[in-house]
Image (cartoon, coloured by chain):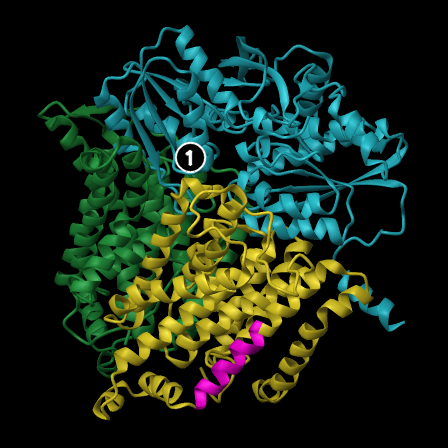
Chain colours: A yellow, B green, C cyan
């Protein structure tokens, strides 16, 4: 069973990429525009999951606070756009998309740079919990930003402005987000073979050996954490543009959990795993919740089965995670 | 400062801490002994509240409902151990997190099917509903002292049980070295099931105790689980003593923060700024406490001296 | 062929009736999961009753009500709204309990040229800067109900007040509302943690309130937190020391639970509102009686708003004589607010928020021993929200 799946996986994932690339055309052709909205959300969540996979899958650092980066990236779009619309704070007010995304990546990297050294002092479950704590702090901080709507969030009626492109057109927005996903996947693919990626993976499987070889493991991990934070913040910036709305609920711990599940569902460490995981998660949620109010029941059962299956409970050959 | 108010707030903090301890103690035992991350631990807290609320309506007596509900919650604990947890012992923490999050969703949906979406209020007997005046003039609801008293009794019982009974000794042995205990002929499967049942019953008890203050409601498991995890991390995973100290610490920090942080902030900033900042910081206070303690002691306050878990 | 097959596959699980034009499709976004689902259930029940009362027809067209669950999350609510707009091609969107869900859903609904009718949430931006010609409120603006409460406190001669409310946007709005009109001194304010791990133990705040020596306590706790708050207020023995005044805390959803738990302290407790089950007009008598007959309980104010929202839509559709393409006629008819509201006759302001009366209510026992609310007196007549002047609409 699992062997069949393993052979099929690359084909299925290739097909998924083709479907996502063609989503605007397919949904226009079949006049099902809602599915384009869903495909775009899936693409953006896949970017975030891929960024998380960088630290979780390759680096073995289970971050339970990645939704904080989503929120930071989203507010990096929302706050300048809000000031550009309603005035005040000229130094940050801007509708320029390049500025928004650069600010998102910068703020995400900076937050990772500040919290990373503290978090990386811990290991295993302690790392999970300290990253979660930082995530919660961001949540409560955003919730207390009364100027920016507090808990109600920020309503921005404009999207980031780019030359030649118009993000108000759902198809263009989708293609740009998809291009970002491809770029992130390409970056991670190249990185895995590069000395940095190898060292990061080496630190996961044999930390002591890497230290003995003279690698500064903590620095390598911090670099990965900062990169991952910046990439997740970019996903957050896309999310803000997709919804034209940002709110603190984006940084809730359950959202961090969902990102984690996308990575695990797709197989931690696999390049296209996050894409599969995000697709499975978003589609299941959509289909099940449109069938019954009690959709948490089958959804939860599927999560349990997926966990048991991944841990190799149903097969004698053992686990590959 | 008004001493009566200070005493009142300290008692309030202790009461919150005791409830946290009841949830965290089971979590830390399961985590420390079985090396199993159970995100669904909060579900027992919720089930305890709902089951005792229902039984209280049937029997007309809240104390009786607690006695009847405890074994029921323990039984549910055993069942979930058998179906979800046992296959995942020794597997990656990630798989455990995924499976137990799924379990939360399942239990929540089942609870919604059984009890509906509205919460269940629990009525206290009149003799618990009164107030007590402490020396110093602080007047407190008697029930809050009941929570503190029963929590302390459970903590003392747990301590005696772990340190002075054969079963407790086996638990400690298995926690220190599972393989060795198994090699020496300890029936670890039954032992683990018993630890799970105990943890579930303790969390269930916390839910039963809190229901008369608030009510039994669907999301209450999700509300407590994160704070309970924070508590066991602060205390050191696997340490009952750590869970106890950390729970009281968290309860006091949270309560005293809510009580005096705004006054404190007003010394340094404008009243308007203090009004905005104080609630935000007090909501974060427990997380700040954890980040601070982990920065100083990455293994928590009382890391078990045996093997290092969670590596 | 492939195209049809693909379209059918994608549309699986959702209604596919785009071909039939002889219906009015109403998307209803509310909360059906999480503890907040009790509110959603009350609203859906009332909306269904409204459709039943019009025999399932508006201006001869069949009414189709499509209910979606927002899961108490703005991103989910937005996605459901997009689905209702793009997939189900609804004509009207209503429901919306929460400000953040409504704010997140506003753009996809209005950009598509749909009518958006809030059946509860009334955040200040939508009444002011962000008002829109196709947005209507069937409820009130957040500030109005607590402003009426501040007025009540003045009339009662209350000099000192302590305030406890949750720390989120609506909580801040409501506290701002009550302090805007209250003329006495506020001795202290506490904003408590709110969200997924909301604080439900108010011991520290109640102790502070008691120590402040204020004459009265003002609280705002919607949903299950309200029950917890009132219980602990009673357990702390505060009812003699300071009288409790609330808004949106004691309602027809929480009262049966209080009664079951024997919480006598809520009897006689006072709150302000735009509506009450004993409001004496034909539409309200019919609504309350039939709701009780159908569902065996009193409707809450959420239910009243949902019932009004559906009737407001009916007025719009009838005004356009069933021509759903004629948005101007629909809008003009809705703006008249002449649909037999359960709150009695009211008018719409330039921002499409009601200009209406606000009443002081108290909790009493009805002749059949059910706890319910009764109007004590009218606090404001034809009151308009303070944000209307920021709205550029005429």
- Of all residues, the one furthest to the bottom in this rendering is A213
Is C97 left, or right, of C146 in this rendering?
right
Q: Residue at x 68, y 55 (%)?
A: A291
- Which SS type dominates the magenta stretch? helix
Q: Is residue C101 magenta?
A: no
Is residue C335 or residue A128 the one in the foreground? Answer: C335
Q: Position of residue A226 (x, y in %)?
A: 36, 71
- In this rendering, the answer to whether C57 lies above or below A198 is above
Identify the residue at image location x=44%, y=85%: A191
Looking at the rendering, the stretch of residues picked out in magenta corresponds to A180-193
Residue B7, quarter of picture: top left
Q: Which residue is mark 1?
A: C225
A191 in magenta? yes
Helix, strand or loop at mark 1: helix
Chain letter for the residue marked with disc 1 in the picture: C
> Relative to residue A69, is residue C351 depicted above or below?
above
- Image quarter in which the C terminus of chain A is found: bottom left
Horizontally, residue A286 falls left or right of residue C380, namely right
Q: Residue at x 38, y 36 (%)?
A: B214
């Amino acid at each position: 069973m699992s062997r069949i799946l393993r052979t099929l996986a690359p084909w299925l994932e290739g097909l998924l990429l083709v479907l996502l690339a063609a989503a605007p055309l397919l949904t226009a052709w079949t006049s099902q525009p809602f599915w384009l909205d869903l495909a775009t959300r899936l693409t953006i969540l896949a970017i975030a999951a891929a960024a998380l996979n960088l630290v979780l899958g390759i680096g073995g650092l289970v971050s339970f606070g990645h939704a904080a980066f989503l929120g930071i990236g989203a507010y990096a779009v929302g706050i300048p756009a809000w000031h550009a619309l309603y005035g005040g704070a000229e130094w940050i007010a801007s509708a320029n998309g390049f500025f928004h995304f650069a600010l998102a990546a910068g703020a995400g990297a900076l937050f990772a740079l500040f919290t990373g050294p503290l978090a990386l002092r811990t290991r295993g479950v302690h790392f999970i919990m300290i990253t979660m704590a930082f995530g919660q702090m961001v949540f409560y901080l955003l919730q207390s930003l009364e100027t920016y709507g507090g808990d109600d969030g920020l309503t921005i009626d404009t999207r980031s402005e780019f030359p030649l492109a118009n993000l108000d057109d759902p198809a263009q927005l989708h293609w740009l987000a998809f291009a970002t996903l491809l770029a992130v996947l390409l970056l991670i693919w190249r990185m895995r073979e590069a000395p940095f990626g190898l060292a990061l993976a080496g630190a996961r499987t044999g930390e002591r050996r890497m230290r003995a070889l003279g690698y500064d493991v903590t620095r390598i991990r911090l670099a990965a954490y900062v990169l991952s934070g910046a990439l997740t913040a970019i996903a957050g910036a896309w999310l803000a543009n997709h919804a034209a709305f940002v709110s603190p609920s984006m940084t809730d711990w359950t959202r961090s959990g969902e990102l984690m599940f996308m990575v695990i569902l797709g197989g931690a460490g696999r390049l296209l795993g996050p894409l599969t995981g995000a697709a499975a998660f978003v589609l299941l949620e959509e289909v099940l919740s449109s069938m019954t109010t009690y959709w948490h029941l089958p959804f939860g059962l599927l999560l349990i089965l997926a966990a048991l299956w991944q841990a190799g409970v149903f097969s004698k050959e053992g686990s590959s995670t | 400062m008004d001493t009566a108010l200070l005493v009142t707030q300290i008692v309030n903090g202790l009461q919150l801490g005791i409830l946290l301890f009841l949830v965290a103690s089971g979590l830390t035992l399961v985590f420390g002994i079985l090396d199993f991350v159970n995100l669904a631990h909060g579900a027992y807290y919720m089930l305890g509240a709902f089951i005792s609320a229902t039984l209280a309506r049937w029997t007309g007596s809240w104390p009786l409902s607690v006695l009847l509900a405890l074994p029921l919650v323990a039984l549910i604990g055993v069942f979930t151990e058998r179906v979800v947890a046992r296959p995942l012992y020794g597997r990656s923490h990630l798989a455990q997190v995924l499976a137990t999050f799924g379990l939360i969703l399942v239990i929540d949906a089942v609870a919604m099917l059984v009890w509906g979406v509205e919460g269940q209020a629990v009525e206290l007997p009149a003799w618990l509903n009164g107030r007590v005046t402490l020396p110093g003039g602080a007047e407190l609801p008697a029930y809050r002292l009941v929570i503190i008293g029963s929590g302390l009794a459970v903590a003392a019982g747990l301590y005696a049980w772990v340190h002075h009974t054969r079963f407790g000794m086996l638990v400690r042995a298995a926690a220190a070295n599972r393989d060795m205990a198994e090699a020496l002929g300890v029936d670890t499967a039954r032992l683990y099931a018993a630890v799970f049942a105990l943890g579930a019953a303790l969390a269930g008890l916390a839910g039963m105790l809190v229901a008369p203050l608030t009510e039994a409601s669907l999301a209450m498991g999700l509300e407590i689980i994160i704070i309970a995890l924070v508590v066991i991390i602060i205390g050191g995973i696997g340490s009952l003593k750590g869970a106890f100290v950390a729970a009281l610490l968290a309860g006091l920090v949270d309560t005293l923060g809510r009580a005096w942080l705004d006054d404190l902030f007003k010394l340094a900033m404008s009243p308007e700024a203090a009004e905005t900042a104080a609630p935000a910081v007090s909501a974060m206070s427990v997380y700040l406490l954890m980040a601070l303690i982990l920065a100083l002691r990455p293994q928590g306050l009382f890391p078990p001296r045996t093997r290092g878990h969670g590596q | 062929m492939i195209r049809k097959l693909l379209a059918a596959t994608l549309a699986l699980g959702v209604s596919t009736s785009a071909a039939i034009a002889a219906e009015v499709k109403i998307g209803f976004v509310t909360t059906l999961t999480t503890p907040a689902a009790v509110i959603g259930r009350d609203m859906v029940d009332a909306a269904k009753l409204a459709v039943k009362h019009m025999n399932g027809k508006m201006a001869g067209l069949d009414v189709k009500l499509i209910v979606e669950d927002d899961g108490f999350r703005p991103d989910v609510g937005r996605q459901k709204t997009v689905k209702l707009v793009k997939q189900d091609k609804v004509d009207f969107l209503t429901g919306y309990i929460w400000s953040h869900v409504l704010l997140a859903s506003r753009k996809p609904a209005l950009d598509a040229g749909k009518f958006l009718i809030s059946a509860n949430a009334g955040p200040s931006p939508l009444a002011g800067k962000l008002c829109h010609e196709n947005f209507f409120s069937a409820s009130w603006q957040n500030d109005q109900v607590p402003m009426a409460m501040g007025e009540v406190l003045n009339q009662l001669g209350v000099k000192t007040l302590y305030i406890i409310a949750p720390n989120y946007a609506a909580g801040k709005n409501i506290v701002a509302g009550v302090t805007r009109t209250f003329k006495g001194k506020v001795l202290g304010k506490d904003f408590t943690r709110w969200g997924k791990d909301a604080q439900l133990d108010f011991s520290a705040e109640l102790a502070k309130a008691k120590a402040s020596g204020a004459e009265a306590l003002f609280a705002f706790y919607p949903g299950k937190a309200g029950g917890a708050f009132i219980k602990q207020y009673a357990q702390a023995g505060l009812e003699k020391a300071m009288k409790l005044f609330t808004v949106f805390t004691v309602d027809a959803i929480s009262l049966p639970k209080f009664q079951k738990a024997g919480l006598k302290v809520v009897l006689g407790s006072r709150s302000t509102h735009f509506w009450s089950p004993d409001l004496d007009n034909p539409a309200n008598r019919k609504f309350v009686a039939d709701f009780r007959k159908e569902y065996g309980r009193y409707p809450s104010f959420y239910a009243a708003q949902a019932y009004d929202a559906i009737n407001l839509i009916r007025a719009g559709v009838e005004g356009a004589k069933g021509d759903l393409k004629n948005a101007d006629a629909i809008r003009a008819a809705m703006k008249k607010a002449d649909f037999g509201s359960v709150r009695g006759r009211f008018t719409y302001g330039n921002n499409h928020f009601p200009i209406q009366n606000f009443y002081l209510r108290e909790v009493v026992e009805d002749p059949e021993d059910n706890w319910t609310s009764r109007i004590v007196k009218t606090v404001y007549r034809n009151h308009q929200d303070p944000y209307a002047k920021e709205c550029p609409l005429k």
